[in-house]
Amino acid sequence: YGAGFYYIPGTDTCIKLGGYLRVETWLGTNSVVAGTLNGVGGAHNRLGNNYTWRSRQDLNIDTRTATEYGVLRTFFDGNFTWTSGGLAGSGATPGSTTYTGDNIAGGSLGVYYAFIQFAGFTMGKAVSIFDAPWTGYPGGNHFELFGEANSVTGVNQFTYTTEFGSGISAAISAQDPTRYYQSNIFNVSGATAAGIVTGAYGVNNFGGTRSPDILGQFRVDQAWGLFQLSAAAHDNHVAYYGATETSGHPDDKWGWAVQAALSIKNIPTGPGDVINVQAVYTDGASRYNFQNLLPTTFAMYGGTGLPGAYQSLGFAGVADAVYGGTTAATGTQLNAVKTWGFNGAYTHNWNPHWNTAIYGSYARANYGGEGKALICSSPALVGAAPIGVALTGACNPDFSIGMVGLITRWTPVKNLTFSADVNWTRLDQNYSGTVTAPTLGAVAKPAAVYELKNQNSVAAVIRAQRVF
C-alpha cells in the first residue's frame, strides 16, 4: 500500500505508523487558532497573553487488508497537547483572576480520526465530505479562516462514496451536527445587557438532536487540479420559549448550505505552485461558513477619540436563527440567518526548501428584516441601565469579518519545517453611536460609555514541525 507499510506477522493485514511533533508560539493573541476576537484577548488589557505556547505529539495508525469487496481500512489519529493557556477575570471577586490553561504536568488528549472504510463506506470520525481537501488551510496557513466549515479534527459520520473513473466521484453522508455544526439559536427575550456587548443576542436555546445533517458531494480530481461541489441540510430544533415544556416552542426549521471549491495546479509561476479557492452560502446553517474552530460571538475593544467615551467596542454574534417570546401565545417562529463567505490562497515555491503563501477569507452574516426587528427591539439593547445598554445610534446586527495573512516555510531537511504566519483580521460591525455597558468582570472592563466602532487584530505564529 506504499512506503511505510509493513505486514503484521501472522496476519494478512498491513500497518503504517506515523505522526508529527509540533512546537509553536502564538504572538499577540490569547488563543492558538485565531486573533484577538473576544474574551480577554479582545479586551486588549493586562489579562491577555502577549504569547501562548503549545507543544503537540500526534500519532496515527493506518491498517489495510485486501478482501473480496476491496480494501478494508481502519484509521486512527490522536494527539497529546500541552498549551500554556491564559487568564480570565472571575467577575466575582474584584481583581481576582483564574488560570485557564493545562495543568503543570497535565495537558490534553485529542481524538481527531477514528474510522472504518469498507466497500465505499466510511463509518466513524473523519473529515466531512462538505470540506474541500485542504479543509481550513488553502495555503497551509496556521490561522483558522472563515468562509468554510473545517472539520480538520474529524466529525462522526456514515458516508458512501462511489467512483465513476477519470477522477470523478460522488458521495452522500449523514453526520453528527452537535459539536461541529450547531451555531446559536438565540431567544432574544432572554437577552441581557452584559450578553449584548459580548455578541450574545439572547439565550442560546437549541434542543436535542432530531436528525443528522444530510450532505452530498460531487468531485472532479485530475492532473490540472480539482473542482468540488458540496451541499448540506441542517435541522434547527429549538427547545422551549420559557423554562418548562408548558411554555411551548417554535417549529423546527431546516437550514442548508452549498459550497464550491476549486484548485488549480501546474500554474506558470513555478513547479508545485497552486491556487486554492472556495465559496459558501448558508441559510440557517451558519457553521458551514463560520467554522467550528472559531468563535460565534465577538467583542473587540480599541481606542476612541469620542468625548465622553471610555474606549471603543465592536461586537457581533453568529446564529443559525433567532426568535422571541416566553410563551406560545406571544412567541415567534424561527427566523433563519443567512450568511456567505469565501477564502483562498496562492502558494509559490521559491526553491525545494522555501515556499510562501498569501491567503485571505471573508464572511458576512445577515439577520433579515424580522430577525433585525427582534434584536433591535430588545430592551437589553435599546433600554437604559441596568436593563439595557442604551444604544444611541443605528441598530443593525449584520456584520462581516475578513482576514489576510502571509506564511513562509523553510524545510532544511525532509520532513522538518520551520514556519512563520502573520495574520490581520478586521471586524466590520454595522452599529453606530454608543452603548453604556455594565461592568464585565471576566474581562476587567468597567461600566462606561463605549463608542461602537470597527476593530482590528494583528497576530502571528512561529512553528517547528517534524513529520514521521
Image (spheres, grey):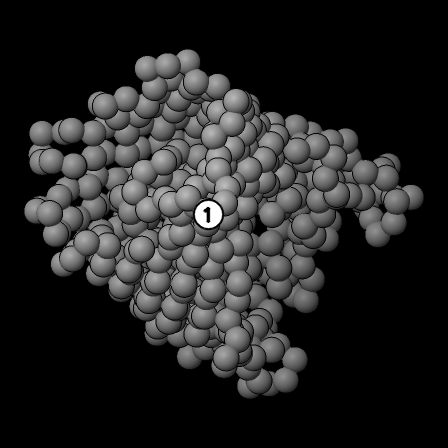
Q: Which quadrant would the N terminus be assigned to in this image?
A: top left
- Report which quarter residue 55 is drawn in: bottom left
Q: Position of residue 416 (x, y in %)?
A: 23, 58
Mark 1 residue type: Pro
Image position of 109 with respect to 213: above or below: below
Residue at the (8%, 47%) spot, across then down: 351
Helix, strand or loop at label 1? It is loop
Image position of 279 with respect to 243: above or below: above
Residue at the (42%, 44%) spot, across then down: 7
What is the residue that sits farthest to the right in this orientation? Answer: 246
Q: Position of residue 147 (x, y in %)?
A: 41, 39
Along the line of sight, the residue nearer the viewer: 310 or 232: 232
Residue at the (70%, 32%) spot, across then down: 211
Image position of 419 with respect to 378: above or below: below
Along the line of sight, the residue nearer the viewer: 354 or 123: 123
Q: Position of residue 151 (x, y in %)?
A: 48, 43
Is 426 placed left or right of 128 in the picture?
left
Q: Which residue in the protein does label 1 denote?
A: 9
Along the line of sight, the residue nearer the viewer: 385 or 192: 192
